[in-house]
Image (cartoon, helix red, strand yellow):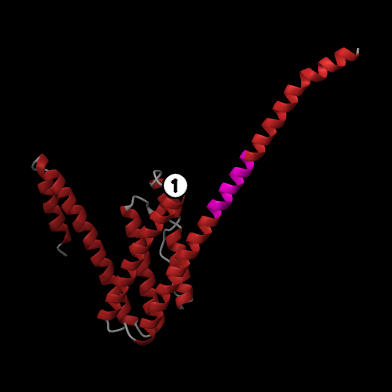
Amino acid sequence: MSIQPTVHTGVKAYSQTSSDNKTAAQTASAMSAENKQQLNRTILESQLSLSMKSDNKSMTLLYRSLTESISSTMAEDTAPAKETGATGEPKYQDEDTSPKATAERIVAFATRFYEAYQKNHPELQGEDALNGFLDLMKGAIDKGFGDARKMLDGMQQLQGKVATDIDDTYGLVQSGLEDFRKRQLDAMKSAAEAAAGNTANSNANNIANSDTTAASPSTSQSRSGRA
C-alpha cells in the first residue's frame, strides 16, 4: 500500500524547518484520517459484496456507517468513545434489522455521547448544550446515511425494499432524536421547578425564623411586666 511512504515523507518534511512543522503535521493527520475512512469503506464493501443476499445485510452496513460517522464526529469534538461506554464492535448476527430496531440502536448509540459533549462544552448550559449536541449528531447521522446510500448504490442494492427500509430508518431516527430532546427538556423543567420549590421553602423557613426571633423579646418583656 502507499500509505506508509506518503506519511513517512510528511514526517520527514516535518523535521526540516519550523515553518514546515505545522503543514506536515496537518497533512499527515488529514491523510491518516482519509486513509482510515477509505480502508473502512473498502472493508465494508468487500464484506457486503460477498454476502449481500438479504435486506438485513444492507441494514447492517447502514448501522456500521452510522456508528463510524458518529464516532468520527465526536472524536473531532474531543469526546472519545471510551468516555461514553460506546466502545467495541456491535453484534449484528442475531439482532433485529427492521427499520424500527435499527433506528433505536442508532439513537441509543448517538445519545450516549451527550454527557461527554456537555463536559467538553462547559460554556454551553441547558437548552443551548442540548441544541448544540443534537445539531452535531444530526450532521453525523446525515453523513452516515449518505455514505451508506453511496455504498449500496455502488453495489446496485439501493432499490426496492432496501431503499424503503433505509428511508424509513432515517425518519425514525429523526423522531427518536426529537423524543430525546423532549425528554431532556422535561428533565430540565422538572429540575428547575424542584430548585425553585427548594428556594421558596428555604426563604419561607428563613422568614419564619426571623419572625420567631423578632417576637422573642416582646414575649420576654410581657412576661416580665406580669411578674
- The residue that disc 1 covers is 125
Query: Tag 1's secondary structure?
Result: loop
Q: Which residues are magenta?
A: 187-199
Drawn side of residue 51 relative to residue 200, left or right: left
Q: Residue 213 location, x and y as percent?
A: 73, 23
Q: Residue 113 location, x and y as percent?
A: 43, 56
Q: Quadrant of the N terminus?
A: bottom left
Q: Quadrant of the C terminus?
A: top right
- Residue 94 drawn above or below residue 183: below
Numbered marks: total: 1
Which sits in the foreground, 63 or 185?
A: 185
Quarter-of-image position of residue 33: bottom left
* Three-letter code for the amino acid on which mark 1 is drawn: Gln
Which sits in the foreground, 197 or 122?
A: 197
- Identified at 13% across, 51% down, the residue is 10
Q: Residue 161 location, x and y as percent?
A: 39, 85
The residue carrying pointer 1 sits among few (fewer than 14), some (14 to 19) or many (20 or more) residues within 10 Å by Cα, namely: few
Quarter-of-image position of residue 87: bottom left
Which sits in the foreground, 162 or 15?
A: 162
Residue 193 in the magenta stretch? The answer is yes
Drawn side of residue 13 relative to residue 173, left or right: left
- Identified at 31% across, 82% down, the residue is 158
Is residue 94 in view from this perspective? no
Which sits in the foreground, 91 or 61?
A: 61
